[in-house]
Image (cartoon, rainbow, N blue to C red):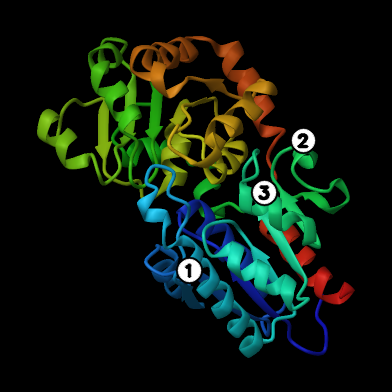
Amino acid sequence: MKSSKPKRIIISGGGTGGHIFPAIAIANALKKLDPATEILFVGANGRMEMEKVPAAGYKIIGLNIQGIQRKSVWKNLMFPVKLFNSVNKALQIIKDFKPDAAVGVGGYASGPLLYAASLKHIPYLIQEQNSYAGITNKWLGKKAEKICVAFDGMGQFFPADKIIKTGNPIRTESVDIAGKKMQALEIYSLSNDKKTIMVTGGSLGARTLNNSILAHLDQIIAADVQLIWQTGKFYYKSIIGQLGENYHPNVRIMEFVNRMDLAYAAADVIISRAGAGTIAELCVVKKPVILVPSPNVAEDHQTKNALALVHDQAAIFVADRDAEEKLVDKALELLKDKSLQKKLSDNISKMALPDADQVIAKEVIQITINN
């Protein structure tokens, strides 16, 4: 898919790992298609993309943009000024870089950059990660050339003729679990004769998941079940302070799991939040999953992501407000129910789209050819 002149692509968005990782994966896939492709990222100043993107080897320019603060009217007073200035800066970036196309992955910087692209008649593609589109993407979708989605039923948000179901880019090294179970159990010093639950609330952690496990640790130990527990960096010290470093031979408490492939490989049941990127990985991992969506995200999209899987009998749903009371019971019940485990594994595996980054990259190149 090479052309005589290297393509110049702007990728915009960020704010969370769920936006940044797909952006970098798409950039890497574009470079794989043609190593001469020139890529510039546009992010929001002060957000994690300003560190993560250069660490991945790409140049990034920051805009002084923020999201709408739902809880504070005062913090929104500067929003129109920041938006105006960000669009102006985005117009200047486009003038200087002269992109053939732009890609928006969601997050604060996506809006100003893609709006500026539309003003300059630069074709753009949106990568919508969630099952419920955000306000900005719904608005930008009207002028997008293509909208790459991960869930069915997105015609309620976007023009149907522009939608292509690609899935969300995943970290291939994290889902490469084949043949690794024994290695994983050995590394975690766990037994192959016992069942293992893995709990992950992401790199920062999830208070609800941690509290739910803390409240029922005795029950897990009484059932002789093993636990791989990623607490996240906000909660690790406090939990270790309560339980000690070596709480119980069946329990592995970690601030962060560096080798997700091994944690996934060791697990018989996985308990997780319902971010779009995590769900994309879980579909490829094909293990029985209990999803506890975070209620603290825009448009409550994690709940909608989780319900999309529940609809296809591909996951068990526990509401955040019910987790402390019900989550551990559900997990222990699932460990005893072989037929339900198989049904969940079979159904979640049908939703896997492991080549999303490559499919999206080809669509990006296609819109440069068509325009």
Residue closer to the observer: 146 or 270: 146
Mark 3 vs mark 1, CA separation in Å: 41 Å
Query: Of discs 1 and 2, which sits in the foreground?
Result: 1
Residue nearer the viewer, 182 or 232: 232
> In terms of sequence position, does the residue under pointer 1 or pointer 2 come before the other?
1
User: Is 131 above or below relative to 67?
Assistant: above
- Residue at 67 percent across and 48 percent down: it is 354
Query: How many numbered marks are there?
Result: 3
Q: Nearer the viewer, mark 2 or mark 3?
A: 2
Q: Is residue 32 visible?
A: no
Residue bearing mark 3:
354
Left or right side of 166 for 86:
left
Looking at the image, is mark 3 or mark 1 earlier in the sequence? 1
Which amino acid, mark 2?
Gly
Q: Secondary structure at mark 1?
A: helix
Residue depicted at x 67% and y 67%? 115
Write down the quadrant of residue 186 in the picture: top left
Residue 26, horizontal then vertical, whole percent: 63, 64
> Dot 2, how many residues are within 10 Å of its Cα: few (below 14), some (14-19), or many (20+)?
few
Q: Secondary structure at mark 3?
A: loop
Is residue 226 something that shows in the picture? yes
Circle on res. 153: 2
CA neighbours of label 1 inside 10 A, class few (<14), some (14 to 19), many (20+): few
Residue 103 placement: quadrant:
bottom right
Left or right: residue 256 versus residue 315 is left
Marks 2 and 3 sit apart, C-alpha to C-alpha, by 20 Å
In the drawing, what numbered circle is on residue 81? 1
Ranked by sequence position, the earlier of labels 2 and 3 is: 2
